[in-house]
Amino acid sequence: MRRPLVTGNWKMHGSRSTIRALMTALCHGVKDRGAADILVLPPAIYIPDVIRLADGTRIAVGAQNVGDQDQGAYTGEIAADMLADFGCSHALVGHSERRLLYGETDALVAARFAAAQRHGLTPIFCVGETLEQRDAGETEAVVGAQLDVVAAKVGALALERAVVAYEPVWAIGTGRAASPEQAQAVHAFIRAHLATHGAGATRMRLLYGGSVKADMAGELFAMPDIDGALVGGASLKANEFLNIIARAD
Ligand code: PEP
């Protein structure tokens, strides 16, 4: 039985005071919202504040990115052991905004994935195709290749200890979510593809991300291979995020 996981990616939004208000509402609201695992990914500078605010609740805290090296002369990067030192449990790797806006390659994503695991963080490994790739019928080839690069670097057992998030690029921040059936089809492909690498894919959690809102979350979570969501914009609104969490049981 895979436990649902609902993750909020706050991207580069907020301030100390808005984040305190959001966390106060979430910490209070999650008490009667089912039993799904909950993770929030604040902008890095707010991680210590959010960890303090989440103390004693079921909200875990992670990072939106993680350094590919352990320590050293890597200006601007934050190492996995630093994140772990502050109490982070997860790190996002390979988000499409990192790939497209900051030129992160599959090889760099694989190195970040490996660094996260070396220091006890669970990677949330994002994959997904662009609209052009989908229209050209290349979704499985693109997603499969993204999985293959990481599998080749870290191996099946390491993959098995990660969470994979399917995030079609065309659905992120556009208000145009994949239909539950479209998402399920790619999730089933991902699970089968991970199994070809020797990973115990039936145990792995696969999240869908891309314009998830509360009104469609129930249908998404009812799909057999969808184990939760990676939520961007809607995770910044406490009630909307809590309503998504409530549908994840
Ligand atoms: C995301 O940033 O991972 C995301 C899915 O964003 P949104 O929910 O806003 O589409």
Image (cartoon, grey):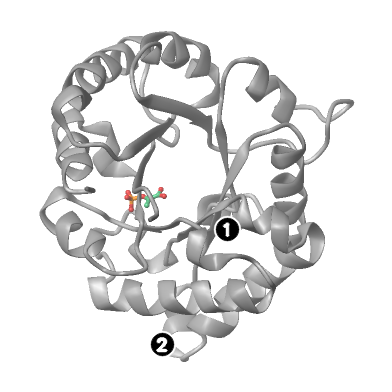
**Percent x, y of residue 229:** 34, 51
Residue reaching furthest left? 215
**Percent x, y of residue 230:** 38, 49
Question: Residue 140 vs residue 99: left or right?
Answer: left
The residue type indicated by label 1 comes to Leu
- Mark 2 and mark 1: Cα distance apart in space: 19 Å
> Which is more toward the observer, 161 or 84?
161
Disc 1 designates what residue?
Answer: 100
Q: Is residue 179 in view?
A: no
> Which is more toward the observer, 89 or 183?
89
- In terms of secondary structure, where does tag 2 sit? helix
| Identity of the residue drawn at 20% across and 32% down | 237
**Percent x, y of residue 182:** 31, 78
Residue reaching furthest bottom? 137
- The answer to whether residue 129 is above or below residue 158 is below
> Which is more toward the observer, 85 or 45?
85
Question: Residue 36 vs residue 71: left or right?
Answer: left
Question: Residue 217 vs residue 134: left or right?
Answer: left
Q: Are marks 2 and 1 in contact (CB under 8 Å)?
A: no
Q: Is mark 2 within 8 Å of ligand 1?
A: no
- The answer to whether residue 102 is above or below residue 188 is above
Disc 2 designates what residue?
Answer: 135
Res 104 → quadrant: bottom right
- In terms of secondary structure, where does tag 1 sit? helix
Q: Count neighbours of disc 1 (C-alpha within 10 A) and say few if under 14, some if 14 to 19, many if 20 or more.
A: few
Q: Count neighbours of disc 2 (C-alpha within 10 A) and say few if under 14, some if 14 to 19, many if 20 or more.
A: few
Res 49 → quadrant: top left
| Identity of the residue drawn at 70% across and 39% down | 116
Residue reaching furthest front? 1
**Percent x, y of residue 199:** 64, 66
The residue type indicated by label 2 comes to Asp
> How many labels, in total?
2
